[in-house]
């Protein structure tokens, strides 16, 4: 089974051969267009991580191209500084792009999607305005000449090879990121932010890193652009260019490297072939974008994804293998998670009202109660989504701070969700590997360059995820895109994701909902086996049979308060509970 | 001079507020922001000039046709660019589909109508000066729209149905409200308001395809600052924006005026992501 | 002689270029067409100049080909619409010089594109001629094969400043532009010129072109005692707003500035026709109505031909069409007299003296590639627009 790094290697190889052989055609015009495609790709490859992977709608990325272009051009022209070597100026452009990538990206942490899109548009306007106004440096409306790179990358084919090598490097680096735990976390932020947080992904830190990388690449692209254009004026950096970058990614398909690369080539070359249509080019881009969004939201990448169009076997049965659990959950555990006097109100409504609850390693603790009794709210308090007004939480005796859901994974607290939070565009195994994110040792930079620690992380995560998938019985579906799974399979996939964290405490929110009787029985065995490895399980469920079959202790909630607590046998005979819920 | 800044500021601000309300009406019905708001405003101006100036129709007929076109475009927006992507609203595909649709219409206008500003007809053949019609027509349109919406939402059954959809579309559907038809009606209403904005501001902003991007951005500022879905907030924020922008134009000059508006926009949003009047905190889990 | 040296230099540059692209110098077929690469902006923003010039260029090429071409060779005009986008212009230049192998490049027609195109043509050793105003575009050392068949920004500035200071006798001047590239650069360049000539700058500013209200700016100018307003912008809406604001204020200060002040688009945006009074835009002596209300003979004859060919003049300016017409005519004459190699064309142009264009008399020397003589750059009376041409402004010896 092959998945992960750089899907469609054959196509890449073909493109690389064609690109390196292009000068044989002896057509300098083709060379200019190909150089342009390479430069755009250097920018788009970085933007792809922002738009295609992290799902941030950054429309005005031309602002960073402008910045990079002016930085290189101004430094090499020597208008404000001593004349700088073009290659060094290019590095300065990268640094400038990195800084402003962070500035442009910053609002993404606080603002909603559409708001963020607007701010990027605003940045694009502002940068152009400043380029116009700051005459002493940028030359204002007259502009400034771009640099000529000296040998060996002099204008013509030399410069083309320079851009091509950089473009190839960008492809390699962004593909490395895409196939790393960082890439999986980015897609998770896009498709299932809550699941990403629960797996320990810190959205601000990761997004900022990606914005910095993407800004740096845009800066480099800008420097090269200024040389290709030979002369830059603020008018050259128009909105159409921004739209081109953005649409190339969406036409290519989100969460893919090959797709946006093909999109970039398509959008750079198409207007040259269809010269009579030049007036309609933006119109056609817009039409293309609309069609893609409505008909094939997955873009070119989706069309090329043959593997996921192969029909899956019908009537699949999930057969967990709890006996393999000890191999995965082999860490010594012990201890308890205790809540004391938790109170949480939304507006005037008391969702939880003085709740005290504890669950211990090695046992299954059931939490039942009618809708609105505070079961899921309790889970959300433990996993940090809600900050109660009063009460304390302790983990193995030490205080567990409220809030900060992305820090829960480091306490080895894992959970599943009432509605499965799947990363639909990623494969099942990638979804599951997400669960182990915090155990990766390598840094972002190490992943960028596939250094040994990154490779070790990947091997470890993949092996652990495969173990978890085998345990829940989904290993045959590892390479399948998660959104093709049946509902019951998603429930087991979420458990596998939680297991990949090797949790000390596992919280399951209605894992049996929507499962068949046979599946519920197997699920029960699995949950019980998990607890017997020493993991504490908190199980929120409506299926009374399951609760009474596998729980060691049961707590019954009503209106945010505990109605009863005890062994299943005690609860089963508790008069109020019986009359209210068990209908017996 | 002050009088000039104030009268223009309020008039332009009224246009921005109307575009902001256009965003809001569409948002309330679908939970989706649509890039088509600025496009509607631009078309209000262009179609007004087309019907009245080029085709020689009477002002009233022209106005009616412009608003009708706006309504039709609103409905098309809903069918083409919003409804198909509502199922997966958390993926924000609506940002892309409405952007694409707005670009499509704007580019078509650019090619068919031209990219230079064209004159917009004088609507009423009377007076000029600081109380010129180009100032009070946008302000009046804005006032009528806001009052009309208040009346619609608070006093009529269909308006309450709109509110119910905006509040909780699942519950509204459970109550048997025809959600799809109400959403269509909302988009038609947004189309009318958006094109009215462009029509009323036409004498100031001219029939110019470039108004689309200007109105898209400056029309969104009142939404962001006034709190989304809050029409009164949009009205106040829109008028303030107009005044601020004209004052900045005058005090710091054209190039830095747009920088100033943008900086204020960013800073306010970063400090108060829900705007001045918005409620915070949506349930995530 | 410097001419010969330059020819040699140019020739070797061309040789190097063809070597670089791996091309053996082709033997010129006797009836191979002469290819002129033309780069107007025909669609998109600021395309009105391109549309106007394109009419002239097409007419000239048609006339030449109908008359049998040049020494039996037809002219092939290869047009690429750049949409005023420098990126498209760069791609188009590469296509024209490398793939189409044109003999001469005519255009681009907007400065932003030409700034990018000029070094590329220089690198490839293709002669180019363009009508863009930015001064730095012509540099005989850096770009020995680049020529301009239009005035420079400085020439236009001098003509306008001369008119304001010497003819209208204004002492305090307000200079205003929008916030686009051309306008910011021009305002910055003209203010020192005015000061040099002894004028007082009452106001200097660049205003957002989308700003619907320019009245505060004009009030400021009036308070500062401005005796003339000099607007520099290619945006008809912006220019019309200045005229309208002046009219509403009932301020009869003269407006002297960019050629677009006299365009039909500006006219259409005026609130009242009388707001166009005392508005003077730059133009060219050979295509303006003289004191007797008549065009100079060549221009009158040209306009008759345009009318016969049913070429529309109502929505454009005569000087645009004439300038577009002159360029291929000059190229044809050059190739006919000197041959089609880059060195021959450049050499011929370097010695061009008194070539009688319809739009302007062209003169080049090896040191001076700006073709239009100072005295042919004039101001005209905007509200006299008739069939694309204007009356000379009062004071030009009319």
Image (cartoon, helix red, strand yellow):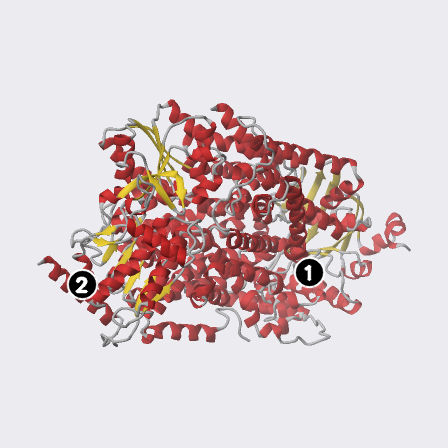
Q: CA distance from mark 1 to mark 2?
A: 86 Å
> In what element is the residue under mark 2?
helix
**Residue A470 left/right relative to B7:** right
- Give yes or no for contact between labels 1 and 2 (Cβ–Cβ under 8 Å): no
**Residue C10 badge:** 2
From the image, state whether disc 1 or disc 2 is nearer to you. Answer: 2
Q: Which residue is mark 1?
A: A531
Image x and y of residue A360, in percent:
68, 53
Which chain does the numbered disc 1 sit on? A
Nearer-the-camera pick, B103 or B67: B67
Image x and y of residue A168, in percent:
39, 66
> In what element is the residue under mark 1?
helix
Q: Crowding near pointer 1: few (<14 within 10 Å), some, many (20+)?
A: many
Q: Please, which residue is most extreme toward the left here?
A: C1
Decide if residue A466 is in sight here: yes
Q: Are marks 1 and 2 on the same chain?
A: no
Image x and y of residue A273, in percent:
44, 68
Nearer-the-camera pick, B251 or A221: B251
In the figure, C188 relative to A142: above or below?
Answer: above
Which chain does the numbered disc 2 sit on? C
Decide if residue A162 is in sight here: no
Q: Quadrant of residue A39?
A: bottom left
Image x and y of residue C325, in percent:
33, 57
């Amino acid at each position: 089974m092959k998945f992960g790094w750089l899907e469609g290697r054959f196509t890449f190889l073909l493109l690389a051969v064609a690109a390196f052989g292009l000068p044989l055609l002896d057509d300098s015009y083709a060379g200019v267009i190909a150089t342009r495609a390479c430069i755009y790709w250097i920018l788009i490859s970085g933007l792809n991580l922002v738009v295609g992977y992290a799902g941030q709608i950054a429309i005005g990325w031309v602002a960073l191209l402008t910045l990079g272009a002016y930085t290189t051009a101004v430094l090499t022209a020597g208008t404000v500084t001593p004349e700088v070597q073009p290659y060094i100026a290019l590095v300065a452009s990268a640094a400038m792009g990195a800084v402003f990538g962070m500035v442009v990206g910053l609002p993404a942490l606080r603002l909603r999607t559409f708001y963020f899109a607007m701010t990027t548009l605003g940045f694009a306007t502002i940068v152009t305005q400043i380029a116009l106004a700051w005459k002493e440096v940028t030359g204002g409306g007259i502009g400034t000449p771009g640099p000529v790179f000296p040998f060996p990358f002099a204008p013509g084919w030399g410069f083309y090879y320079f851009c091509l090598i950089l473009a190839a490097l960008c492809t390699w680096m962004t593909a490395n990121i895409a196939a790393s735990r960082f890439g999986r976390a980015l897609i998770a932020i896009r498709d299932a932010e809550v699941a990403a947080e629960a797996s320990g992904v810190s959205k601000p830190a990761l997004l900022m890193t990606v914005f910095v990388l993407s800004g740096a690449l845009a800066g480099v692209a800008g420097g090269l652009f200024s040389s290709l254009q030979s002369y830059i004026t603020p008018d050259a950096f128009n909105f159409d260019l921004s739209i081109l970058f953005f649409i190339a990614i969406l036409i290519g398909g989100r969460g893919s490297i090959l797709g946006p690369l093909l999109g970039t080539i398509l959008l750079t070359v198409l207007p040259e072939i269809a010269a009579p249509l030049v007036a309609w080019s933006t119109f056609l881009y817009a039409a293309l974008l609309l069609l893609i969004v409505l008909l094939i939201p997955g873009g070119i990448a989706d069309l090329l994804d043959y593997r996921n169009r192969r029909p899956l076997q019908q009537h699949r049965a999930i057969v967990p293998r709890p006996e393999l659990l000890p191999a995965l959950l082999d860490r010594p555990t012990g201890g308890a998670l205790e809540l004391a006097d938790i109170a949480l109100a939304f507006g005037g409504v008391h969702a939880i009202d003085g709740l005290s609850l504890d669950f211990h390693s090695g046992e299954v603790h059931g939490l039942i109660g009618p809708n609105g009794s505070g079961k899921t709210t309790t889970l959300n308090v433990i996993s940090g989504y809600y900050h109660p007004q009063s009460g304390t939480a302790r983990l193995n005796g030490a205080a567990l701070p409220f809030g900060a859901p992305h820090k829960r994974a480091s306490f080895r607290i894992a959970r599943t969700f009432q509605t499965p939070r799947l990363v639909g565009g990623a494969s099942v195994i990638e979804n599951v590997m997400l669960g182990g994110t915090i155990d990766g040792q390598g840094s972002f930079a190490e992943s960028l360059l596939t250094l040994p620690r990154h490779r070790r992380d990947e091997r470890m995560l993949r092996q652990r995820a495969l173990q978890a998938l085998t345990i829940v019985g989904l290993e045959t579906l590892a390479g399948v895109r998660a959104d093709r799974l049946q509902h019951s399979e998603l429930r087991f996939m979420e458990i596998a994701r939680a297991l990949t964290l090797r949790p000390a405490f596992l919280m399951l929110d209605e894992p049996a909902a929507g499962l068949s009787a046979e599946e519920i029985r197997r699920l029960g065995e699995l949950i019980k086996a998990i607890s017997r490895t020493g993991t504490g399980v908190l199980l929120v469920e409506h299926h009374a049979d399951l609760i009474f079959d596998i729980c060691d202790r049961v707590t019954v909630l009503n209106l945010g308060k505990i109605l009863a607590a005890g062994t299943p046998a005690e609860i089963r005979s508790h008069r109020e509970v019986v009359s209210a819920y068990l209908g017996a | 001079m002050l009088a000039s800044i104030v009268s223009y500021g309020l008039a332009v601000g009224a246009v921005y507020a109307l575009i902001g309300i256009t965003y809001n009406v569409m948002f309330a019905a679908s939970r989706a922001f649509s890039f088509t708001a600025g496009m509607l405003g631009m078309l209000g101006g262009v179609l007004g000039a087309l019907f009245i100036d080029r085709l020689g129709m009477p002002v009233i007929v022209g106005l009616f046709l412009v608003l009708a076109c706006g309504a039709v475009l609103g409905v098309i927006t809903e069918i083409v660019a919003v409804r198909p992507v509502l199922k997966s609203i958390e993926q924000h595909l609506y940002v892309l589909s409405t952007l694409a649709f707005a670009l499509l219409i704007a580019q078509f206008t650019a090619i068919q109508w031209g990219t230079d500003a064209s004159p917009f007809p004088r609507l009423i053949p009377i007076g000029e000066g600081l109380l010129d019609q180009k100032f009070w027509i946008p302000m009046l349109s804005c006032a009528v729209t806001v009052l009309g919406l208040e009346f619609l939402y608070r006093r009529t059954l269909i308006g309450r149905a709109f509110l119910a959809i905006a509040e909780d579309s699942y519950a509204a559907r459970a109550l048997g409200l025809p959600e799809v038809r109400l959403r269509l009606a909302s988009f038609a209403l947004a189309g009318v308001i958006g094109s009215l904005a462009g029509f009323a501001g036409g004498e100031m902003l001219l029939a110019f395809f470039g108004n689309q991007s200007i109105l898209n951005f400056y029309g969104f500022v009142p939404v962001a600052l006034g709190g989304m879905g809050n029409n009164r907030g949009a009205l106040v924020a829109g008028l303030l924006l107009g005044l601020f922008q004209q004052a900045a134009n005058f005090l710091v000059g054209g190039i830095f005026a747009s920088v100033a508006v943008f900086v204020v926009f960013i800073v306010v949003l970063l400090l108060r992501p829900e705007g001045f009047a918005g409620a915070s905190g949506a349930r995530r889990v | 002689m410097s001419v010969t040296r330059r020819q040699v230099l140019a020739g070797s540059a061309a040789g190097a270029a063809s070597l670089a692209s791996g091309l053996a110098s082709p033997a010129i077929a006797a009836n191979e067409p002469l290819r002129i690469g033309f780069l107007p902006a025909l669609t998109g923003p600021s395309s009105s100049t391109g549309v106007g010039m394109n009419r002239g260029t097409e007419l000239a090429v048609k006339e030449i080909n109908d008359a049998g071409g040049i020494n039996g060779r037809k002219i092939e005009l290869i047009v690429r619409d750049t949409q005023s986008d420098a990126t498209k212009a760069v791609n188009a230049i590469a296509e024209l010089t490398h793939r189409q192998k044109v003999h001469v490049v005519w255009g681009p027609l907007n400065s932003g594109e030409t700034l990018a195109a000029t070094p590329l043509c220089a690198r490839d050793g293709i002669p180019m001629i363009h009508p863009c105003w930015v001064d730095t575009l012509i540099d005989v050392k850096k770009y020995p094969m680049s020529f301009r068949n239009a005035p420079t920004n400085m020439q236009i500035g001098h003509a306008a400043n001369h008119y304001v200071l010497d003819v209208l006798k204004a002492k305090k001047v307000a200079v205003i532009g929008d916030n686009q590239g051309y306008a910011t650069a021009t305002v910055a360049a003209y203010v020192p010129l005015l000061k040099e000539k002894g004028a007082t700058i009452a106001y200097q500013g660049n205003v957002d072109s989308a700003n619907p209200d320019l009245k505060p700016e004009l009030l400021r100018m009036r308070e500062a005692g401005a005796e003339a307003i000099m607007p520099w912008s290619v945006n008809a809406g912006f220019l019309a707003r200045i005229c309208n604001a002046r009219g509403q204020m009932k301020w009869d200060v003269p407006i002297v500035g960019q050629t677009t002040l006299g365009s039909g688009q500006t006219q259409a945006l005026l609130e009242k026709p009388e707001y166009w009074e005392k508005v003077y835009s730059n133009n060219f002596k050979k295509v303006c109505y003289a004191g007797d209300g008549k065009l100079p003979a060549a221009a009158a004859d040209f306009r008759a031909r345009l009318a016969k060919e049913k070429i529309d003049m109502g929505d454009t300016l005569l000087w645009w069409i004439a300038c577009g017409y002159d360029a291929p005519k000059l190229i044809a004459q050059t190739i006919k007299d000197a041959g089609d190699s880059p060195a021959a064309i450049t050499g011929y142009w370097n010695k061009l003296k008194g070539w009688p264009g319809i739009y302007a008399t062209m003169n080049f020397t090896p040191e001076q590639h700006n073709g239009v003589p100072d005295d042919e750059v004039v101001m005209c009376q905007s509200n006299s627009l008739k069939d694309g041409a204007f009356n000379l402004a009062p004071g030009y010896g009319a």
